[in-house]
Amino acid sequence: MAITLNHTIVPARDKVAAAKFFAELFGLKRGRTGHFAPVRVNKQLTLLFDEDRDFDSHHLAFHVTGREFDAILRRVKQANIVFGSAPWSLDDGKLNEWGGGRGFYFRDPNGHVLELMTVPQ
């Protein structure tokens, strides 16, 4: 049996702003906002941004192609978003080369840690 994650709820202080931030950086389109502000990541996964006032930081890790990685990193740099090579080093401005690929981490405006990697961990 193949198990696929279909969607997950990502808490945010402003669901529309959070969805817009994520969609713009990742080069994705937002769905129609209702109770949630959805962003379709791929055919299997949708992130549903939902408003909340009190929540813990989430860690969301994404395996991307080299071309997607370069485009997202370029947008992160253009937006002057601080990034780093590891979850314990979110602001060193470096990439990691774990598993023979490239990766980096950064925080979104809600404090969630987003990770990109070209080789899955």
Image (spheres, grey):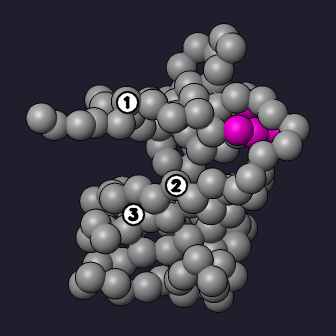
Sort mark 2 into few (<14), some (14-19) or many (20+) by Cα contacts within 10 Å.
few
Identified at 87% across, 38% down, the residue is 53
Q: Residue 17: give x, y in percent of width and height.
A: 75, 35
Type of the residue with mark 1: Asn
Please state the horizontal and vertical placement of residue 101, each as a whole percent of the image. 29, 78
The mark that comes first in sequence, 1 or 3, is: 1
Spatial CA distance of label 1 from label 2 is 14 Å
Question: What residue is disc 3 on?
Answer: 69
What's the CA distance linking mark 3 and mark 2? 15 Å
Return the disc, 1 or 2, that comes first in the chain's sequence. Answer: 1
Residue 96 seen in the figure: yes
| Left or right placement of residue 107 versus residue 51 in this view | left
In the displayed structure, 22 sits above or below 99; it is: above
The disc placed on residue 60 is 2
Q: Nearer the viewer, residue 21 or 3?
A: 3
Residue 18 is situated, as x and y percent measured from the top left of the image, at 70, 39
